[in-house]
């Protein structure tokens, strides 16, 4: 359920407010199961790096300019602590959980000037706040379904048209639905599919309203003994509606990714550590790079 905005600063996507809050590929394969009753803490530490910008046709191009410089690369490190509460309530076999997640990010953009000169720009600050007041889920013999609604409050560091923003400057809302296929009774093997649809309001001070985005995440996970989990996973993300207030309202970005993850449970079914690395491909109208996540979670 992790929701992290990887702020690709100084790029075409941010300049036209095309980036939204939800970053697929951050949540682990089994994170869409609801936690057991009580409180749980998770922390997603995410690193994104890219020096490849794609145009609307998928051709590699130079990035946008920053004070006369051409952006070459972007790196973003994000920390998203997440607190969830399952009160133990059930209705028709469905459990309920409430989730809140602030975020903090350190961004770096490197650029050069034609004919000589370089620019290095770094920024650290708080990002926007994710609140998920509704997250429900329940299981049957070989399936588990979950879904919910969340919103993002624009409390992060933001100044209209500034190249070093951490917050995005607008409210957005997301709907999620998906689940798991469990071929074995012991849940040793899981097949995951989750869809996320996010739509946003107008960005403060710019008259820009970003286009809606649809994300599809997939994963295949396997238990190895009682403490280890291995898996392959990835995502597909598309901009499905045009933005308003931008030079090219018909532009649509997209990106795909695939990779693997490994998780270890020092305390079985209570505390885990997980690492994941995904490589993006097929990007259009955005950066294409590598996404790495180290996460931990503890159930009280």
Image (spheres, grey):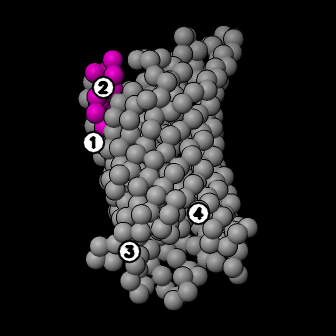
Question: Are discs 2 and 4 less than 8 Å apart at CB?
Answer: no
Q: What residue is drawn where x is 53% and y is 67%?
A: 30
In front: mark 4 or mark 1?
4
Alpha carbon distance from label 2 to label 4 = 41 Å
Q: Which residue is mark 2?
A: 208
Region rendered in magenta: 200-213
**Is label 1 in a helix, a strand or a loop?**
loop
The picture places residue 43, in percent across and down from the top left corner, at 60, 50
**Viewport quadrant of the C terminus:** bottom right
Q: Position of residue 227 (x, y in %)?
A: 70, 74
Tag 3 residue = 138
Name the one closer to the observer, 92 or 57: 92
Q: Position of residue 157 (x, y in %)?
A: 49, 24
Tell me the distance, in whole angstroms, between the alpha carbons under discs 4 and 3: 19 Å
On the image, numbered disc 1 is attached to which residue?
A: 241
* Residues at marks 3 and 1, CA–CA distance in whole angstroms: 32 Å
Can residue 3 be seen in the rendering of this structure? yes
Where is residue 186 drawn, in percent x and y?
55, 86
Q: CA distance from mark 2 to mark 3?
A: 39 Å
Vertically, is 280 above or below 116? below
The image quadrant that residue 91 belongs to is bottom left
272 horizontally vs 84: left or right: right
Secondary structure state at the residue bearing disc 2: loop
**How many C-alpha atoms fall within 10 Å of the one at disc 2: few (<14), some, or many (≥20)?**
some
User: Is 22 in front, or is 64?
Assistant: 22
Mark 2 vs mark 4: in front: 4
Q: Spatial distance from mark 4 to mark 1, Cα to Cα?
A: 39 Å
Residue position marked by numbered label 4 in the rendering? 299
């Amino acid at each position: 359920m992790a929701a992290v905005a990887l702020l690709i600063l100084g790029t075409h996507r941010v300049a036209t407010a095309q980036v939204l809050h939800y970053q697929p590929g951050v949540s682990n394969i089994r994170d869409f199961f609801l936690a057991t009753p009580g409180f749980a803490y998770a922390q997603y530490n995410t690193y994104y790096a890219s020096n490849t910008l794609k145009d609307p046709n998928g051709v590699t191009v130079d990035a946008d300019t920053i004070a006369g410089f051409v952006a070459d690369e972007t790196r973003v490190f994000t920390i998203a602590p997440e607190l969830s509460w399952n009160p133990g309530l059930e209705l028709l076999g469905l459990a309920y959980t409430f989730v809140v997640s602030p975020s903090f990010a350190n961004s770096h953009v490197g650029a050069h000037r034609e004919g000589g000169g370089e620019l290095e720009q770094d920024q650290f600050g708080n990002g926007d706040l994710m609140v998920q007041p509704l997250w429900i889920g329940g299981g049957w013999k070989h399936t588990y379904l979950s879904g919910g609604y969340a919103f993002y409050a624009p409390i992060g560091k933001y100044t209209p048209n500034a190249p070093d923003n951490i917050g995005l400057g607008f409210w957005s809302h997301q709907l999620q639905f998906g689940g798991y296929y469990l071929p074995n009774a012991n849940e040793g093997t899981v097949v995951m599919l989750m869809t996320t649809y996010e739509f946003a309001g107008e960005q403060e001070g710019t008259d820009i309203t970003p286009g809606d985005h649809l994300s599809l995440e997939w994963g295949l996970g396997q238990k190895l003994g009682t403490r280890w989990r291995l898996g392959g996973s990835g995502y597909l993300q598309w901009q499905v509606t045009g933005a308003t207030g931008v030079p090219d309202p018909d532009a649509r970005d997209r990106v795909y990714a695939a990779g693997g993850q490994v998780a270890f449970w020092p305390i079985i079914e209570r505390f885990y550590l997980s690492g994941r690395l995904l490589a993006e491909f097929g990007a259009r109208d955005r950066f294409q790079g590598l996404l790495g996540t180290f996460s931990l979670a503890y159930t009280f």
